[in-house]
C-alpha cells in the first residue's frame, strides 16, 4: 500500500558556482527515499518545480542538478537561485515531497570598468599649483575583485584662435593618480594653449586570466583661464629698442609726431599709454592713452634742448596691472628764430689818416645761435658814404683814402 511520501535527506541543499560556469557543469545532487515496500510505490521521480529560470536541469532518476544548455549567469543581476525540487513516487495515489536547492553565483572579474560620467570638463587658472586636485574622474567596476589603474593616453590642444597646438608642447601638462584625481604636472601657459582635450583611461588589472582587456576611456575637456602674467611689449621696426622722430621747433600745436604700439599676450590686452617724464616740461608733448599717438603740444626750443627723450609707459588692464616702458627720442629741428648778435654791441676804433688802403682797421664779430645755414652770419655796411668796406665773411673792415 502506498502510504508513505518521499523524504529528502537532508531536507535542504546548497551549492556554489562561478558566473562563467559552462553548460553541463554539475551543481549538486539531491536525494530522496520512500519507505514503501513495492518498487512502484517507492520509485521516485525528481523534477525542478520552480526557480531555475531555464538555467538548470535535474536528472529525474539520480537527482544530479547541472547547468542547462544556453544558461547565462550574471552575478550582478542574480546572485542567488532558490530551486524548488519535487520528489514524486509512482504509486497509484502518488505522494510528493519538496526541498530547496540554494545555488550561490560567485563573481568572476569579467566586466570592464566604466567612468561615472560620459565626459568631464573643468576650468583651470593657468597658474594652478601642482599639489591641488584639478578634478577627480571617478570610475567604477561591477565586479567584486577589481583593481583599477588610471592613465592619460592622449592630449590635444587649441590656442585662442582655434589653431592646433603641437602635442610636444602640452603632453606633460597633467598627471592622474591611482584614485582618478587629475593634477597639474608642469607649468601651464594659456597663451600657448587655451583649450585641451585629455583622454583618460582606466584599466582593471585584476581581470581573469585569458579574459579580454577591461579598459574604458573618457574625454576630459580643460579650459585654461587667463592670469595676468605677461608684460606689454612695444613693437619696433627691425632690431630697434626705442622709437625716434623729429619735429620742428616752430611746428604748430598740436602736431602729430608718431604712434607707439604695445601688445600683450594675456586675455585682457587693453593697453593704456602715458608719458612718464621728459627733459622738457611734460606739457610740451602729449600721448593719446588709447591709441598711443604722440603729439607736440607746447613750445620747444632747439637752442635750449636739441634732443628730448621721453619715457612712454604701457600699462595693461589686468589685475594686478603690469607695465613696460620705452624711450622715444625726439630731435628738435632748427627754425631760424634768432637774430645775429654783435659782440661787443658797440665799439670805437682809431685810424691814422695816412694808413694804407686795404689795411684792416677792425675785426667785427657777430654770432647767431641758430643751427647750420640759419646760424651763418654775413656782414655789410649800410652806407656807401664812408671810406670803409667790409668783407662779407671774414668780418674785417678795410680802409679807403681819407682827407683831413
Image (tube, helix red, strand yellow):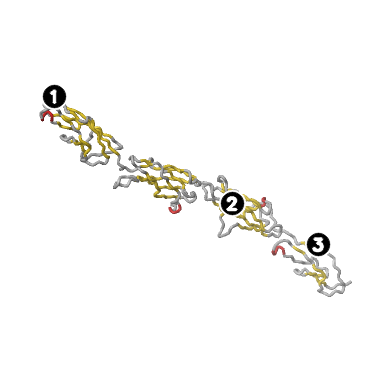
Secondary structure under the numbered disc 1 in the rendered image: loop
Where in the figure is residue 110, as x and y percent of width and height? 30, 43
Position of 271 compared to 110: left or right? right
Task: Depth check: give the residue in front, 198 or 361.
Answer: 198
Mark 1 vs mark 2, CA separation in Å: 111 Å
Task: Depth check: give the residue in front, 269 or 291.
Answer: 269
Give the number of callouts. 3
Q: Is residue 295 above or below residue 344?
A: above
Q: Image quadrant of residue 45? A: top left
Can residue 328 be seen at all in this image of the molecule?
yes
What's the residue at 54%, 47% (across, down)?
228
**Contact (CB < 8 A) between labels 1 and 2?**
no
Secondary structure under the numbered disc 2 in the rendered image: strand
- Could you tell me which quadrant the N terminus lies in? top left
Q: Image quadrant of residue 5? A: top left
According to the picture, the residue beneath numbered tag 3 turns out to be: 345
Q: Is residue 179 above or below residue 100?
A: below
**Contact (CB < 8 A) between labels 3 and 1?**
no
Position of 228 compared to 404: left or right? left
Where in the figure is residue 373, as x and y percent of width and height? 70, 64
Where in the figure is residue 204, as x and y percent of width and height? 35, 45
Can residue 253 be seen at all in this image of the molecule?
no
According to the picture, the residue beneath numbered tag 2 turns out to be: 324
Nearest-to-viewer mark from 1 and 2: 1
Mark 3 vs mark 1, CA separation in Å: 163 Å
| Among the two numbered marks 3 and 2 on one chain, the one whose residue lies closer to the N terminus | 2
Q: Is residue 192 above or below residue 373?
A: above
The residue furthest right is 404
What's the residue at 22%, 40% (across, down)?
25
According to the picture, the residue beneath numbered tag 1 turns out to be: 3
Secondary structure under the numbered disc 3 in the rendered image: loop
Amino acid at each position: 500500500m502506498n502510504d508513505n511520501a518521499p523524504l529528502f535527506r537532508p531536507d535542504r541543499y546548497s551549492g556554489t558556482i562561478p558566473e562563467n560556469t559552462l553548460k553541463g557543469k554539475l551543481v549538486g545532487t539531491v536525494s530522496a527515499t520512500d519507505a514503501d515496500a513495492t518498487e512502484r510505490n517507492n520509485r521516485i521521480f525528481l523534477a525542478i518545480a520552480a526557480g531555475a529560470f531555464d538555467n538548470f536541469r535535474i536528472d529525474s532518476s539520480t537527482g544530479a542538478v547541472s547547468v542547462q544548455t544556453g544558461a547565462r549567469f550574471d552575478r550582478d543581476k542574480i546572485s542567488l537561485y532558490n530551486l524548488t525540487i519535487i520528489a514524486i513516487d509512482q504509486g497509484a495515489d502518488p505522494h510528493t515531497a519538496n526541498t530547496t536547492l540554494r545555488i550561490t553565483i560567485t563573481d568572476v572579474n569579467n566586466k570592464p570598468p566604466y567612468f561615472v560620467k560620459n565626459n568631464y570638463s573643468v576650468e583651470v587658472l593657468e597658474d594652478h599649483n601642482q599639489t591641488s586636485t584639478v578634478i577627480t574622474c571617478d570610475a567604477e567596476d561591477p565586479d567584486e575583485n577589481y583593481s583599477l589603474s588610471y592613465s592619460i593616453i592622449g592630449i590635444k590642444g587649441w590656442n585662442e584662435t582655434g589653431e592646433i597646438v603641437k602635442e610636444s608642447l602640452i603632453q606633460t601638462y597633467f598627471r592622474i593618480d591611482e584614485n582618478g584625481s587629475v593634477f597639474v604636472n608642469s607649468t601651464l601657459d594659456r597663451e600657448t594653449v587655451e583649450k585641451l582635450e585629455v583622454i583618460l583611461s582606466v584599466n582593471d588589472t585584476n581581470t581573469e586570466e585569458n579574459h579580454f582587456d577591461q579598459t574604458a576611456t573618457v574625454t576630459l575637456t580643460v579650459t585654461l583661464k587667463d592670469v595676468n602674467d605677461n608684460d606689454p611689449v612695444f613693437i619696433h621696426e627691425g632690431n630697434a629698442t626705442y622709437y625716434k622722430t623729429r619735429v620742428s621747433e616752430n611746428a604748430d600745436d598740436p602736431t602729430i609726431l608718431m604712434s607707439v604700439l604695445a601688445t600683450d599676450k594675456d586675455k585682457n590686452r587693453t593697453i593704456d599709454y602715458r608719458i612718464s617724464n621728459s627733459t622738457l616740461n611734460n606739457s610740451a608733448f602729449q600721448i593719446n592713452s588709447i591709441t598711443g599717438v604722440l603729439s607736440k603740444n607746447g613750445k620747444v626750443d632747439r637752442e635750449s634742448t636739441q634732443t628730448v627723450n621721453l619715457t612712454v609707459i604701457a600699462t595693461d588692464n589686468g589685475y594686478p596691472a603690469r607695465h613696460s616702458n620705452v624711450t622715444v627720442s625726439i630731435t628738435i629741428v632748427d627754425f631760424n628764430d634768432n637774430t645775429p648778435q654783435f659782440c661787443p654791441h658797440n665799439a670805437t676804433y682809431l685810424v691814422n689818416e695816412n694808413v694804407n688802403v686795404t689795411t684792416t682797421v677792425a675785426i667785427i664779430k657777430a654770432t647767431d645761435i641758430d643751427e647750420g645755414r640759419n646760424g651763418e652770419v654775413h656782414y655789410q655796411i649800410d652806407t656807401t658814404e664812408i671810406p670803409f668796406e667790409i668783407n662779407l665773411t671774414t668780418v674785417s673792415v678795410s680802409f679807403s683814402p681819407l682827407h683831413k
